[in-house]
Image (cartoon, rainbow, N blue to C red):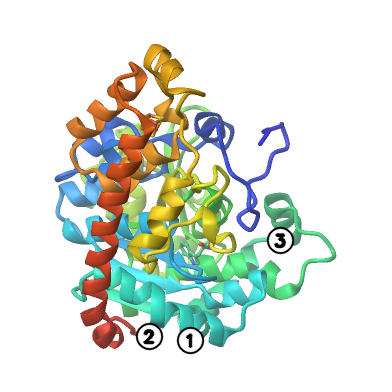
Amino acid sequence: MIIGKKMKINPWSSTTYQDYTRLRDEFGIEEFSEKLWKKLPKPHKLLRRKIIFGHRGFNTIQDSIKNKKPWVILTGLMPSGKMHLGHKMVIDEVIYYQSIGAEIAIAVADIEAYATRGYTLKETKDYALKDYIPNYIALGLKTNKCRIYFQSQNQDVKDLAYILGKKINWSQMQATYGFNGSNNMTHIFSPLIQTGDILHVQLKKHGGIKPTLVPVGVDQDPHIRLCRDIAQAHRLYNVTVTKDNKIGVFVKVDENIDRLLDNAEKTLRSLRFSKLKRITDYKAIYINDAKKTDIQKISQTLALTEPKYDGYGFIQPSATFHRFITGLTGEKMSSSKPESAIFLTDTPEEAAKKIKNAKTGGAVSLEEQKKHGGKPDECVIYELFLYHLIEDDKELGEIYTGCKNGKKMCGECKKKAVELMSKMLLDLKNQRKNAKTIVSKYIKK
Ligand code: TRP
Ligand code: SF4
């Protein structure tokens, strides 16, 4: 798709994206560079292979991991149809983060599916309970520090959606989503429900204010931006660099100003800043011995104090963005086009058939391919290896170069893909047998 000046990312469309670097730059998403993932314990293949290509605010999460402080993953699933390889990616990420100590919360986006896809709440519930969640468990999601809930049954989520919506107006919603007079109100409201999902994990009831990471496909970026803006808008303090290059703490509300300034002063001193200049008329404290790199720490420390003054103190959620796996037909992988998708409940035979028919990056003839090589970057079989089937980077690298220099042929690759896929599907089938009996252990309000 062509990204013009006024491009919007539409989370509900069936667009496929080609140029992820451009998309990233256009929307101010930061690069998920090697520097970030190299520091993580046993980095997952989706991280190592740049499938997760962008982020917002990941540094906050990195700090928590480094300092062994609590942090939480919140993501959501919209069960519309059966779970396929595209959906598997997010849960692979979640399971990885669970293995390195994150607390996990997963929203079943039944309200969103009802609002935007025309499913009934009952239909989504069935998909979630019978297909998605058993598959999550089969893939390795553990019950430890893990909670799955339905949007429609979570009062905190719905309350936050309503209350936090106060700081966002209709023009902003139109500018972000391109809404117009024909969109129904539930659809218009659903991004606020998602904000409720993301921020409710920081309520006291759920362990309080803490760094939150939302791993999603890049189509979700509008929701992430909205949520980060809303979180910030509800803070009582703003810590920022002023026009004349000073670092200051500003009180954003009009009640309790003196108490809030006293509290900020005390907090700053506890962080060992001493060159403080308080200007009550500006509702500000300037910190003359702070550096820009201190802002995050100051802001987070102040956030923790905000509930004492009836604030939420939400830490802006962080997000990572992954690329989408291409469908077997070369278009988007979609539940509504079964030939484009491999479902986790497909039989090995069904999957083999789709793989055999898949679009590769091979040349027009064997001879041509031997001479000029194939194009692994444009090959969905290669993508299957890259995203799902091959763990070992060296083995993957050999396929890549073998293809490029004409040593590997598509028939051979497809055969390997069929074998590995059958193994994966049979394995999942086996694991699902036990999974079904323990689904209820994961569902919590
Ligand atoms: N909107 C997401 C989707 O279309 C699902 C979702 C709901 C979600 N709530 C969320 C994703 C919170 C991340 C965080 O798939
Ligand atoms: Fe794809 Fe393999 Fe063919 Fe290369 S040889 S184009 S990687 S199927």
Pointers 2 and 1 in contact (CB under 8 A)?
yes
- Whichever of labels 2 and 1 marks the residue nearer the N terminus, that label is 1
As drawn, the residue found furthest toward the top would be 371
Q: Which residue is drawn at 65% across and 74% down?
A: 115
Pointers 3 and 2 in contact (CB under 8 A)?
no
Q: How far apart are marks 3 and 1 (CA)?
A: 26 Å
What residue did someone put label 1 on? 153
Query: Callout 1: 10 Å neighbours few (<14), some, many (20+)?
Result: some
Disc 2 is placed on an element classified as loop
What residue did someone put label 3 on? 169
Q: Distance between the residues labelled 3 and 2?
A: 30 Å
Q: What residue type is labelled 2?
A: Lys
Near-viewer residue (231 or 142)? 142
What residue did someone put label 2 on? 445
Residue 380 in the image: x percent, y percent?
A: 44, 40
Whether residue 23 sits left or right of residue 392 in the image: it is: right
Residue 441 in the image: x percent, y percent?
A: 25, 85
Pointers 3 and 1 in contact (CB under 8 A)?
no
